[in-house]
Image (cartoon, grey):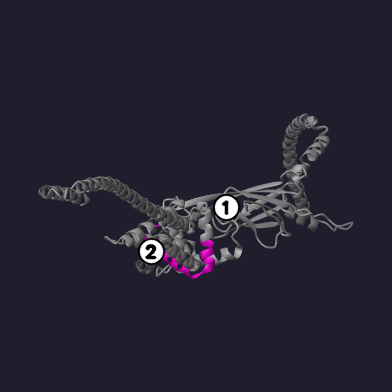
């Protein structure tokens, strides 16, 4: 019988009034209900006895656990003081910032600008405290420049910056190639357009080709280089960037100064380090409150392109050959060619000037002067001037012009020396002639003396003629005739 059934039976038995009879079935129903309750109470009692045993066991375990806990809690007495001390000691650490840095790409081409974004928050992710802190940034390679709109302290070498965080807790800086010092942002932007141009008929941009090419000798890379050369020749801003870049890359010795292997790419991995601090006052003893680093890779390609550009003399060689043929015999040949190089450099750029010099050298080398001494001299002068210019490594024409001036002076000195030599030779010849003449005069004087003596002897002979002695006259005349013949032979 369930409790619900027993409850229903009891409800049916209730409500009796005095004098009502209790029927047997009612009594039996009541007894059955009481029996059922008794059985349940007995079962409950049995269950309670088991519970009592369990409670006793549990009480024992609880007492043991409480004893163990008491033993463990006892050493924690004074914990409040310990926590307070730790809180005081870690307070400066909790003032640190959570500094993160990111960029859109890991790999760039030189000529591109990588933008680095530094973001700082409190350790719990909240905003930075006021006044806004600063970020010191330094790079192992490359040049740094803050994005416009930030308060910045710059460095003349452009390899370090101090920038104040903006209201969003950010600092944005631009990282460029190491060989772009002093190049303006506008010039860089103009040159960046070169990388977005189409590389010939490849259907790709110059940037994509140079990023994907395995080496500078790749056919598509060479096609991209030709496109860059066309833009270099037609755009002053592109020339300005490329010329300044190569000048810094070679340390000013552009001719022969590009030391990399033109058949391989060179990569520069710049490590940028940033240190957050509360202010930018050098005398403030504030500790660094956040550090972040990032590495960005740059692929070098400008020197590889410049190699091909200055060696590609075919477009300008015919004109230089024509000019050289016209002026090869003039005394001031080198001066005229140097003037022409300087005049064209305005539109050709530094690399264009070098290409013109290489073309001029090639035009001079193929000249065959034969026995023409003027052509021989002009060819030698032109070759010597260009060889001296190339040896110095500088892209201007100052050395070649100086060579021409020195050669002119040397030629003048040589001509003067030759004239002096000729004069000296003439003087020596004249001296010799004078000596011969002196000897002849001395001989004539001696002959004159002998003639005078002969004449005196002749006079004495004539005076001694005895007109009476006619017979003796013939012999004496014969003697006189012989004497005159002797004098005549002496005179001749």
Q: Position of residue 272 (x, y in %)?
A: 60, 50
Q: Where is residue 298 in the image (x, y as percent from the top left)?
A: 52, 54
Is residue 41 depicted above or below 390 in this figure? above
- Between 229 and 3, the one lying in front of the other is 229
Extreme residue toward the right, this view: 18
| Quarter of the rendering containing residue 314 | bottom left
Residue farthest along the front direction in this orientation: 468
Please, is residue 442 above or below residue 179 in the view?
above
- Residue that numbered label 1 is attached to: 142
Is 210 magenta? The answer is no
Magenta residue span? 216-242
Residue nearer the viewer, 252 or 461 = 461
Circle 2 SS class = loop
What residue appears at the point 54 percent right and 60 percent down from the top-left corner? 112
Picture coordinates of residue 301, whole percent (x, y) = 46, 57
What residue appears at the point 76 percent right and 48 percent down from the top-left corner? 281
Q: Can residue 138 be seen in this view?
A: yes
The answer to whether 376 appears left or right of 88 in the picture is left
Q: How far apart are marks 1 and 2 (CA)?
A: 33 Å
390 sits to left or right of 465: right
Res. 285 image quadrant: top right
**In the figure, is residue 340 to the left or right of 241?**
left
Any mark on residue 313, and which? 2
Element under label 1? loop
Magenta span has 238?
yes
């Amino acid at each position: 019988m369930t409790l619900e059934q027993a409850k229903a039976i009891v409800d049916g038995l209730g409500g009796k009034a005095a004098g009502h009879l209790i029927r047997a079935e009612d009594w039996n129903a009541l007894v059955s209900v009481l029996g059922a309750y008794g059985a349940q109470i007995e079962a409950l009692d049995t269950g309670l006895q088991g519970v009592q045993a369990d409670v006793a066991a549990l009480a024992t375990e609880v007492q043991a656990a409480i004893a163990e806990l008491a033993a463990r809690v006892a050493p924690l007495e004074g914990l409040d003081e310990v926590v307070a001390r730790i809180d005081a000691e870690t307070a400066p650490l909790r003032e640190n910032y959570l500094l993160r840095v990111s960029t859109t790409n890991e790999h760039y081409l030189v000529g591109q600008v990588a933008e680095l974004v530094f973001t700082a928050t409190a350790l719990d992710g909240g905003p930075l405290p006021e006044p806004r802190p600063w970020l010191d940034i330094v790079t192992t390679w490359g040049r740094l420049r803050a994005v416009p709109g930030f308060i910045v302290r710059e460095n003349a070498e452009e390899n370090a910056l101090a920038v104040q965080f903006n209201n969003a807790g950010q600092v944005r800086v631009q990282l460029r190639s190491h060989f772009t010092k002093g190049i303006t942002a506008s010039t860089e932007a103009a040159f960046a357009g070169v990388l977005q141009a189409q590389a010939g008929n490849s259907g790709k941009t110059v940037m994509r080709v140079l990023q994907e090419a395995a080496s500078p000798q790749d056919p598509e890379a060479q096609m991209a280089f030709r496109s860059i050369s066309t833009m270099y020749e037609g755009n002053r801003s592109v020339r300005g960037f490329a010329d300044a870049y190569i000048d810094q890359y070679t340390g000013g010795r552009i001719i022969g100064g590009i030391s990399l292997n033109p058949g391989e790419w060179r990569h520069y991995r710049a490590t940028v380090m940033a240190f957050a601090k509360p202010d930018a006052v050098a005398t403030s003893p504030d500790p660094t409150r956040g550090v972040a680093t990032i590495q960005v890779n740059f692929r070098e390609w400008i020197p590889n392109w410049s190699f091909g550009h200055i060696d590609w003399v075919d477009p300008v060689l015919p004109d230089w050959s024509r000019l050289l043929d016209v002026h090869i015999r003039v005394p001031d040949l080198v001066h005229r060619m140097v003037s022409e190089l300087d005049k064209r450099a305005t539109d050709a750029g530094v690399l264009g000037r070098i290409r013109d010099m290489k073309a001029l050298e090639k035009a001079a080398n193929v000249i065959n002067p034969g026995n023409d001494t003027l052509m021989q001299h002009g060819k030698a002068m032109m070759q010597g001037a260009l060889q001296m210019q190339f040896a110095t490594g500088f892209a201007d024409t100052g050395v070649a012009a100086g060579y021409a001036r020195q050669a002119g002076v040397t030629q003048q000195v040589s001509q003067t020396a030759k004239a002096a030599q000729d004069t000296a030779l003439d003087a020596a010849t004249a001296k010799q002639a004078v000596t011969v003449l002196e000897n002849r005069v001395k001989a004539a004087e001696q002959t004159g003396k002998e003639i005078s003596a002969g004449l005196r002897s002749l006079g004495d002979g004539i005076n001694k003629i005895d007109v009476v002695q006619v017979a003796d006259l013939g012999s004496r005349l014969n003697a006189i005739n012989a004497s005159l013949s002797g004098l005549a032979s002496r005179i001749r």
